[in-house]
Image (cartoon, helix red, strand yellow):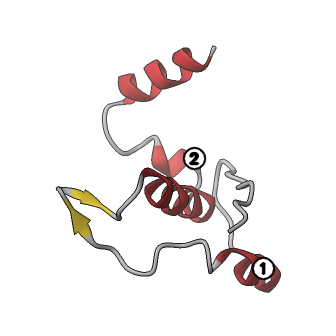
C-alpha cells in the first residue's frame, strides 16, 4: 500500500474524485477502540489524522486543545 503525501492547508479543502480513488484504500475501514486507542496501528491513526487535517485545515486543528501544546510542537520541529 502506497502512502500518499497529504496537502494540509490553513483552511482545509475537499478531495477531487481522483484523490478519493487514490486514497480511500489507505483509510482505516472503521473506527475501533483497541487498548484505549482508535485503530490498530500508529500508521492508521496518522493516516486518518492527515485525511481529516486536509479536510478541516490547520487553522481549525490548532483551536482544539491548549495553544501552548501546538507552539511546543512547532518549536520541536525547529
Q: In which quarter of the image is residue 32?
A: bottom left
Q: Residue extending furthest right? A: 18
Give residue 55's quadrant in the image: bottom right
Count neighbours of disc 1 (C-alpha within 10 A) and say few if under 14, some if 14 to 19, many if 20 or more.
few
Rendered position, 77 above or below 33 = above
| x 73%, y 60%: residue | 4
Q: Which of 77 and 13 is in front in this view?
A: 77
State the mark number for residue 25.
Answer: none
Residue 60 position, x and y percent, is 49, 51
In the image, which is nearer the foreground, mark 1 or mark 2? 1
- Work out whether residue 55 or residue 22 is closer to the camera in this orientation and state it: 22
Helix, strand or loop at mark 1 = loop
Q: Could you tell whether 30 is left or right of 47 in the image?
A: left
> Which residue is label 1 attached to?
16
Position in image of residue 31 (x %, y %): 33, 74
- Point 35% across, 62% down: residue: 40
Tag 2, which secondary structure? Answer: helix
Looking at this rendering, what residue extends furthest in the front direction? 1
Report the residue marked by disc 2. 58
Q: Residue at x 55, y 23 (%)?
A: 74
Left/right of residue 60 with respect to residue 7 in the rendered view: left
Residue 7: give x, y in percent of width and height: 73, 54
Q: Where is residue 44 in the image (x, y as percent from the top left)?
A: 47, 61
Residue farthest to the left? 36
- Distance from disc 1 to disc 2, alpha carbons, whole Å, reads 19 Å
- Tell me which numbered mark, 1 or 2, is placed earlier along the sequence: 1
Q: Quadrant of residue 37?
A: bottom left
Front residue of 4/59: it is: 4
Amino acid at each position: 500500500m502506497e502512502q500518499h503525501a497529504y496537502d494540509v492547508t490553513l483552511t482545509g479543502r475537499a478531495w477531487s474524485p481522483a484523490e478519493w480513488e487514490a486514497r480511500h484504500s489507505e483509510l482505516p475501514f472503521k473506527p475501533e477502540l483497541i487498548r484505549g486507542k482508535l485503530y490498530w496501528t500508529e500508521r492508521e491513526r496518522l493516516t486518518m489524522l492527515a485525511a481529516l487535517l486536509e479536510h478541516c485545515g490547520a487553522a481549525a486543528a490548532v483551536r482544539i486543545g491548549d495553544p501552548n501544546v501546538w507552539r511546543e510542537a512547532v518549536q520541536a520541529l525547529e
